[in-house]
């Protein structure tokens, strides 16, 4: 009797449908097979997820043709990152919402150490991955998050001013003409129309205070409009304000369960008015929450947040939202370690963004699969089963998923 090949399992059928939708979003039919191979290469195991090693894993007998196919897809093919990410959102967000509503849009920047000076966006700047100034490139991302999972929906390379003003380098790395210098907050504002940065050097007006009104109108000329400050009427830094608060303004609060213990710290929250450039305005900034974390035993506060959540927000809800950034850090670790977000070795603008989009697309399938099952599955116990000779993909430390027989 002849042997019979097993039919694809449910997960494999879902992956095939998902990847087919992505391929259609990429446009021309010639891109369909390379895109499917690229996403599969990102999901399969391997230390490097750059083109050469992925080609070897995907087709060990025809490495060079496979390499050329993958390279053309990310470095040359003119498909739209925005259209593909929209397709990812359409598939993944409904599965996320089944487990709970979207509670936050989160802006983050992530650095990728990179040697040399010819790859697009590379310069010496602060790199969060190593915690210091380093030769690297930096990308700004926007993610939507439920309480249990998150998905990047926007991703854009930060182009330092020295790059944006160097026409020769821009041409060599094929940066589109419409791309101009933008600060990271400006990039975030383009992605979500709003972004607030909270730093200990930020100044605010103490509770109940605000800038002085404009000067009285003179006998001639237009009436003054701008708010004022005086020698004895100045804003204070958030650190100064925190240090001036009484001990009773702070309380121990638990915001969620960690992996081995409850996460607790000491917090204080007050309503303040941001003071940033308000002497250039006709009206003061609206009141916002200033949340301060001052762990017991520390000599001074360690973190600060500004929040536009309603005045009626309870402290625990405010803290839970402020601390929700942890989910983005987890995502970036997975994207970098498991899906090779930082492994692109090309130098041009299109290739950098195409590779990142496909990493997010591959990750989106895993997010959708995790949200089909219980919280324990979403925590990292769900493997991706690849048919054929290649072994299955699964997050490090999770049990092996048995193949269909």
Image (cartoon, rainbow, N blue to C red):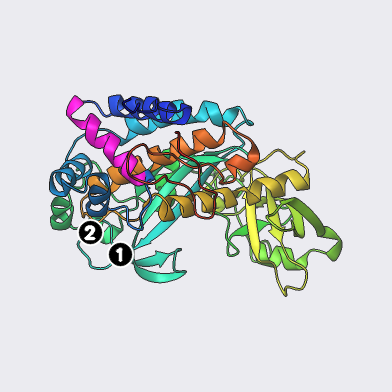
The magenta-colored residue range is 28-42
Judge from the rendering whether residue 22 lies leftward or rightward of residue 106; answer left or right. Answer: left
Q: Earlier in the sequence, mark 2 or mark 1?
A: 1
Is disc 2 in contact with disc 1, using a CB cutoff of under 8 Å? yes
Crowdedness near tag 1: few (<14), some (14–19) or many (≥20) residues, C-alpha within 10 Å: some
Real-space Cα separation, disc 2 to disc 1, in angstroms: 8 Å
Give residue 280's position: percent from left, percent from top: 51, 50
User: Which of the 4 quarters of the picture holds residue 82?
Assistant: top left
Judge from the rendering whether residue 167 lies leftward or rightward of residue 108; answer left or right. Answer: left
| Residue 208 visible within the image | no
Q: Is residue 99 magenta-colored?
A: no
Give residue 92's position: percent from left, percent from top: 48, 30
Give residue 346's position: percent from left, percent from top: 21, 54
Give the residue pinned by disc 1.
Answer: 114
| Residue 197 visible within the image | yes
- Extreme-right residue of the structure: 248
Give the residue pinned by disc 2.
Answer: 119
The quadrant of the rendering that contains the N terminus is: top left
């Amino acid at each position: 009797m002849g042997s019979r090949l097993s039919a694809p399992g449910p997960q494999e059928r879902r992956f095939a449908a998902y990847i087919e939708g992505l391929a259609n979003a990429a446009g021309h039919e010639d891109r369909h097979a390379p895109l499917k191979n690229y996403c599969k290469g990102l999901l399969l195991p391997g230390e490097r997820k750059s083109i050469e090693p992925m080609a070897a894993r995907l087709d060990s007998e025809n490495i060079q043709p496979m390499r050329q196919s993958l390279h053309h897809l990310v470095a040359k093919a003119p498909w739209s990152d925005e259209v593909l990410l929209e397709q990812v959102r359409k598939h993944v967000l409904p599965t996320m919402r089944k487990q709970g509503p979207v509670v936050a849009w989160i802006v983050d920047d992530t650095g990728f150490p990179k040697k040399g000076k010819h790859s697009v966006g590379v310069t010496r700047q602060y790199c969060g991955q190593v915690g210091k100034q380093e030769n690297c490139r930096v990308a700004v991302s926007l993610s939507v998050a439920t309480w249990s999972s998150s998905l990047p929906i926007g991703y854009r390379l930060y182009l330092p001013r020295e790059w944006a003003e160097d026409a020769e380098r821009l041409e060599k790395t094929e940066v589109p003409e419409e791309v101009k210098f933008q600060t990271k907050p400006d990039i975030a504002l383009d992605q979500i129309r709003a972004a607030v940065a909270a730093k200990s050097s930020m100044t605010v007006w103490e509770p109940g205070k605000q800038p002085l009104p404009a000067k009285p109108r003179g006998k001639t000329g237009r009436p003054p409009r701008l708010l004022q400050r005086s020698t004895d009427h100045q804003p204070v830094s958030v650190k100064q304000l925190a240090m001036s608060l009484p001990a009773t303004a702070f309380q121990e609060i638990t915001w969620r369960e960690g992996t081995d213990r409850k996460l607790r710290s000491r917090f204080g929250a007050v309503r303040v008015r941001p003071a940033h450039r308000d002497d250039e305005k006709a009206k003061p900034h609206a009141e916002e929450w200033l949340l301060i974390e001052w762990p017991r035993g520390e000599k001074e506060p360690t973190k600060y947040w500004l929040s536009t959540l309603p005045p009626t927000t309870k402290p625990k809800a405010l803290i839970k939202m402020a601390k929700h950034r942890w989910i983005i850090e987890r995502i970036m670790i997975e994207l970098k370690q498991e899906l090779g977000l930082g492994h692109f070795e090309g130098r041009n603008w299109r290739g950098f963004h195409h590779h990142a989009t496909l990493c997010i697309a591959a990750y989106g399938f895993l997010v959708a699969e995790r949200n089909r099952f219980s919280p324990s599955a979403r925590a990292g116990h769900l493997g991706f089963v690849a048919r054929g000779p290649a072994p299955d993909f699964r997050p490090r430390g999770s049990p092996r998923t048995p193949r269909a027989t």
